[in-house]
Amino acid sequence: MRTPFLAFPGLALCLLAGTVLNADAQPAQPQPKVTHPVADLLASSPSLVLDNGKLRAVVRPPDLEKGFYRGTRFDQAGVITSLKAGDTEFYGPWFERTAPEVLDYVYVGRDLVAGPDSATSGPVEEFAPLDFAPRPGLFVKIGVGVLRQPDTGAYDKYRHYEIVDAGKRETRATDTSVTFSQSLSGAGYAYDYEKTISLIPGTRMMEIDHVLKNTGTKAIDTTVYDHNFLTLTPGNSGIRISFPFSVKADTAQAANPPAPDLMAIEGNSLVYLRAQKFKERLSFPITGFGGTADDYDIRITGPTGAGVQIRGDSPMTKINIFSVTQVQAVEPYIAIHVPPGGEQRWRYLYDYTP
């Protein structure tokens, strides 16, 4: 059964009032004076190529001086600027240009211009900050490092914070896998974090494995989500996102709910009914999932049949849906709790259909 979004109680009121009830709403910002083409960033940043014969991925290692992504929002390890199965491209920069003063993104003419903390690509992850306080001091973001809060402002994921200590990093690569490690001690925390991206031989599957070891005396309690920047179909028309549960829109928390003619709920699926318009932004959470990892099973399929299945081995705590004309994203969150001396492991498995 197809359900238009305005049928959900409360959503019409939210749309009419123009209310923004979610921190995922974009910040107000001026137009940048100078922008830079993303092609220059791709050409100048180091890269690694993984190839298992069925998948070919271009991975950008962390590098604070020359890296493709040097922001403080996302884990800097594991950025994928291309992944192809046959002739089908699944990832890639979803912005045409960058500018250092931009928060999140803006449009300059027809170009989407991303700021340094959102200008990334592929299945990138973001951890919630550890011990951030609205006063001058230090806090930690796993995968980034020890950061400086310079004032009394609230935490802003779109803001670029000074990196005081990026920790000790190491990269180990083979033809089909790469492992990134970060060891850090500072601002009251200490941990060893390892992420491995593997293309499974003989398949069109990619695995992302994580190990977080708490080497300090303070418990690590946070969340992490994968943004899954998918550049499968320009405009996203005809994309279907399916889950193993009945989807419900969390309208009370919608930052940018979809127009009623843009998306519908069909049982366990969200369906884009048309292409998104220029500057049209969609960002809203969904509910309906349970408390086990069985529901972490997401299928995204384009109008030609190309798509990806994403499975995780941890229960989800939140799911957000995001898209603009250049990119579509399903963002599943999980909880992280690692006591002193303990460790937590989690895994995502991607199965691509060209």
Image: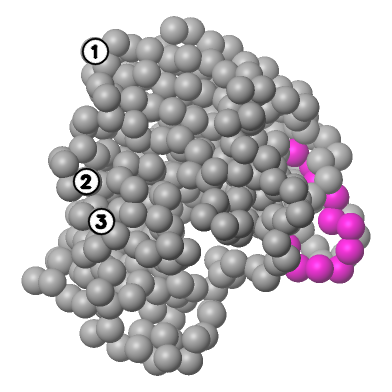
In this rendering, is residue 17 above or below 75?
below
Q: Is residue 189 left or right of residue 219?
A: right
At which x and y percent is residue 79?
A: 54, 32
Q: Quadrant of the C terminus?
A: top left
Q: In this view, does 270 lie to the left or right of 135?
A: left
Q: In this view, does 8 lie to the left or right of 134?
A: left
* Of the image marks 2 and 1, the number of the one nearer the N terminus: 1
In this rendering, is residue 45 above or below 215?
above
- Look at label 1 and name its amino acid: Gly
Q: Which residue of the protein is positioned furthest toward the left in this rendering?
A: 1
Find the distance from the CA under tag 2 to the CA under tag 1.
Answer: 22 Å
At which x and y percent is residue 37?
A: 62, 38
Find the distance from the CA under tag 1 to the CA under tag 3.
Answer: 31 Å
Which residue is disc 3 drawn over?
A: 237
* Of the image marks 1 and 3, the number of the one nearer the N terminus: 1
The magenta stretch spans residue 323: no
Which residue is disc 2 drawn over?
A: 301
Q: Is mark 2 on a helix, strand or loop?
A: strand
Foreground: 77 or 108?
108
Q: What element carries label 1?
A: loop
In the picture, the disc for residue 202 is: 1
Q: In this view, does 50 lie to the left or right of 24?
A: left
Front disc: 3 or 2: 3
Q: In which quarter of the image is the N terminus?
A: bottom left
Magenta residues, as a range? 145-155
